[in-house]
Image: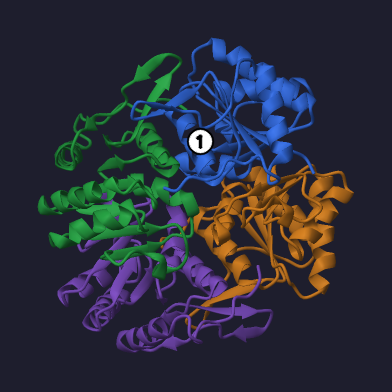
Chain colours: A orange, B purple, C green, D blue
């Protein structure tokens, strides 16, 4: 069965993230993973372009009802009409999620993945503090290749021990 | 029209949060606000107990399909069957959200509110960093009474200027 | 625990249905039931007006994101942003559903209730045929009072034998 | 851009429907359409088997959270965790829907498609009456090949005139 790796990232990221997202998509596709994302522009488009450049398959879970809003690098588009509700669908349909950059939608996907026990890998993304304590809730990769590697391992191991324990509420 | 204030918080919080949540619920109800929450135990139950002690109205958006899983202090229960998808419903049905404590579900509600432009007030909850920068994305209250006050102001002003600008992705 | 009765009906029904819906709402409220509906105009508004005229509580599950789109007779409004996805929420949050009139949204609520085992009562609504066979999938009431009576009985018995068996697919 | 054709049908249909569904899937794939379904057994599995036998692409929108519950003929599986809420996703992600057989879930997909203006083609499925009037709300095909043909035409024309007008409520 194929591994599905979700990539969360903003539609208007800082430009350096686009190259990183494209390389991430390529690495995931080279390893045979299906890439799931929100189907939009920015990080989402870059990761799909990278995946398709390596012959990979991409799935876009669009927030709206119009398929034409998907980026041009989607193998499959799903207009959900759920708005940010598609963020939870992304988490549910991924065996692991890579969070790229600093959007609030991306933060919601990190949180929903942590809440539901889906492995998360960070790449130039949020870190969390509670009071004065740093909370290292998920592994952070320094490069797109490392992020892909960690995500693929987590996706392969999904359900057999890697998963973080959900944390109530 | 009534103001709806959502309260996000964990089912198994650290015990001191329960007293804070109860006082928060009381203050919100005293001001005539309808309290919306996830309808479960822990912070959710405490805030409902507080609201009902002041004669207030409480709404619980349950993750499952069984109304009996709601806490005993709900005026209205809505079994959504959406799992953590009810977190987005909570945000959408609230004019402002108070985030209490450190659960990952609570973090998802903070993120979804920030993403969709619903005002958020923090109370003993997460803070966010991007790289080495602290990101002060929402006001933080020191006490339940202050959190209620800030949330009520934000809920009243909702749509007329208070809203944070959504941040892509 | 209160009984929740959902009422499904169109925003632009044939006018005689409005009086029937209003009487239905009144009867449900007189019996102490909470009325759940889509929160809009037409049948939804009429049933809420009837329920509030008897001192009842009404809940509107709005398709959009704007609370102001709810009708004026809602005790509680929940802007879901789910579009027709709120139809399933209506079914899930009701112990029994009364289907009034001939909209396609109403038909979807009949079907989702039958699929998920929630009791349905018909009032001047669709009937179903498969091939040349009439399928009597739910009881039909001749009057609003009779519909209320059947729905209240079904809601009270919900889970203890009344439920139709779900039918696959 | 590819055409997406949804196929609604039960997990436990009458056996003759399975052959019809398989042929329907084959015809859709031969025409280059992507087949979207609920991803389960019965009609859903048969249509996917048919589509894959012609080299086609299939997408399964699963009701639960476990990808392993999908049938073996899915190119892409999306575990939605939405229960019957995936029925609306199927409608939203399809340019036209073929309804096969007599399940209540299938009826909900017919109704949601009619409500939201997505073309529906019937194949051995429900017909509708309002009072004593037959309501011919969608075209009915006599054979799987004819259903495929009608659906492909409707999917191609989607948005340029074919769509039924939505009917309130």
Give residue B18's position: percent from left, percent from top: 28, 73
Which residue lies at the image location 28% right of the left edge and 77% below the top edge?
B33
Which image quarter holds the N terminus of chain D?
top right
Task: Tell me if residue A145 can be seen.
Answer: no
> Which residue is painted at 36% across and 37% down in the image?
C110
Left or right, residue D131 beside residue D120: left
Residue A20 position, x and y percent, is: 82, 65
Q: Nearer the viewer, residue D143 or C2?
A: D143
Which residue is situated farthest in the top direction here?
D16
Which residue in the rendered view is the most extreme toward the left?
C30
Residue on which the image places disc 1: D109
Q: Residues within 10 Å of mark 1 (few under 14, many from 20)?
A: many
Secondary structure beneath disc 1?
helix
Q: Quadrant of residue B96?
A: bottom left
In the rendered view, tell whether residue B164 sits above or below residue C24: below
Report which quarter residue C101 is drawn in.
top left
Q: Position of residue D25 (x, y in %)?
A: 68, 23
- Quarter residue A50 falls in: bottom right
Residue A164 drawn at (x, y percent): 54, 55
User: Is residue B159 at all visible to an observer of this figure?
Assistant: yes
Residue occupying image coordinates x 46% and y 56%: B84
Question: Which of the pair D30/D158 is nearer the observer?
Answer: D158
Q: Chain of mark 1?
A: D
Q: Is residue A28 above or below residue B54?
A: above
């Amino acid at each position: 069965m194929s591994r599905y790796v979700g990539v969360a990232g903003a539609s208007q990221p800082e430009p350096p993230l686009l190259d990183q997202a494209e390389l991430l998509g390529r690495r995931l596709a080279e390893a045979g993973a299906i890439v799931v994302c929100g189907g939009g522009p920015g990080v989402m488009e870059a990761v799909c372009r990278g995946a398709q450049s390596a012959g990979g398959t991409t799935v876009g879970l669009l927030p709206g009802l119009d398929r034409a809003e998907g980026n041009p690098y989607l193998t499959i588009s799903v207009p959900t009409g759920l708005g940010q509700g598609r963020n939870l669908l992304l988490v549910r349909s991924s065996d692991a999620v890579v969070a790229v950059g600093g959007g609030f939608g991306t933060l919601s996907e990190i949180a929903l993945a942590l809440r539901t026990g889906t492995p998360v890998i960070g790449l130039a993304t949020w870190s969390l503090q509670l009071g004065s304590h740093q909370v290292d809730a998920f592994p952070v990769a320094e490069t797109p290749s490392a992020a892909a590697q960690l995500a693929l391992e987590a996706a392969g191991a999904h359900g057999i021990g890697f998963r973080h324990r959900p944390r109530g509420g």
